[in-house]
Image (cartoon, rainbow, N blue to C red):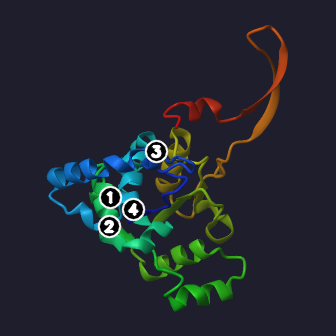
Amino acid sequence: MKVIFLDIDGVIQPCGKQDRFEHIEDIDVVYKELNEKFGIDYYKYNEFDVAAVYYDWNTVALRELRRIVDTTGAKIVISSDWKLFGGLQRMIDFMRIYDMAEYLIDVTPDAGKDKRVRQLQEERSSCETRSAEILVYLERHPEVTNYIAIDDMDLRRGLGIHAIITPNRLIRIVADRCIEILMSQPDNIPEGRNDWRPKYDYVQRQNARGEWILRQVSDLDEELREGRY
């Protein structure tokens, strides 16, 4: 089985995206729409969390996530701190809003409650907490044959080539790299770019008045233009 360990913030919800606060007065309408559509009592979930999923999750990032799972057959395990506030069923109901509930199968262990995660961190002093949670999950699930961890944090010290760092959301070329890793043999993953945080430089450009100015650009400007938030 192939697994995607999925972070939320900075992957499918861009950090800094806060449209939910502008629409919070309309949340009752959203609750009613979701309850009628899915036959689930969304009122049991925090209104700001529901609003975040409804207004702030990025549809381009979700489309690319779906492309990864459809292409590779991978399943999703939530590694984000979102798992701490309601567990698996809450996340399944949130993913259902975007017709992706069927892909989600589990959440990683909670370092605050799981002794093995803390033990692993002691054994590997350089291992990040989230990486340790993922590694313990892998210990307990030998059926996982290959995996990636999509996160806006750098987890490469603990997970190596399986860790993908997003540029604040999942975009097409990052999804392409995820697919490449998942479709490879675990012991023969091709080298490639895993850190997709933008690389910035300055170039000279003329403004509308014909004046030459220095402008900051990144190597991902074109890719990030689609679905810009």
Q: CA distance from mark 2 to mark 1?
A: 6 Å
Dot 4, how many residues are within 10 Å of its Cα: few (below 14), some (14-19), or many (20+)?
A: many
What's under tag 3, amino acid-wise? Asp
Could you say which disc has been placed on residue 19 in the image?
A: 3
Dot 2, how many residues are within 10 Å of its Cα: few (below 14), some (14-19), or many (20+)?
A: some
- Observer-side mark, 2 or 4, equals 2
Residue 116 at least partly seen: yes
Residue 13: x and y in percent read 48, 51
Residue 223: x and y in percent read 58, 33
Q: Earlier in the sequence, mark 3 or mark 4?
A: 3
Q: Nearer the viewer, residue 166 or 68?
A: 166
- Residue to which mark 4 is pinned: 76
- Residue to which mark 1 is pinned: 94
Q: CA distance from mark 2 to mark 4?
A: 14 Å
Q: CA distance from mark 3 to mark 1?
A: 17 Å
Are dots 2 and 1 in contact, CB under 8 Å? yes
Residue 57 at least partly seen: no
- Observer-side mark, 3 or 4, equals 3
Q: Residue at x 67, y 76 (%)?
A: 127
Q: CA distance from mark 3 to mark 4?
A: 26 Å
Q: Earlier in the sequence, mark 1 or mark 4?
A: 4
To which quarter of the image does residue 73 belong? bottom left
Q: Secondary structure at mark 1?
A: helix
Dot 3, how many residues are within 10 Å of its Cα: few (below 14), some (14-19), or many (20+)?
A: some
Q: Earlier in the sequence, mark 2 or mark 4?
A: 4
Residue 70: x and y in percent read 34, 48
Are dots 1 and 4 in contact, CB under 8 Å? no
Q: Nearer the viewer, residue 28 or 58?
A: 28
What's under tag 1, amino acid-wise? Phe
- Residue to which mark 2 is pinned: 90
Residue 59: x and y in percent read 41, 41
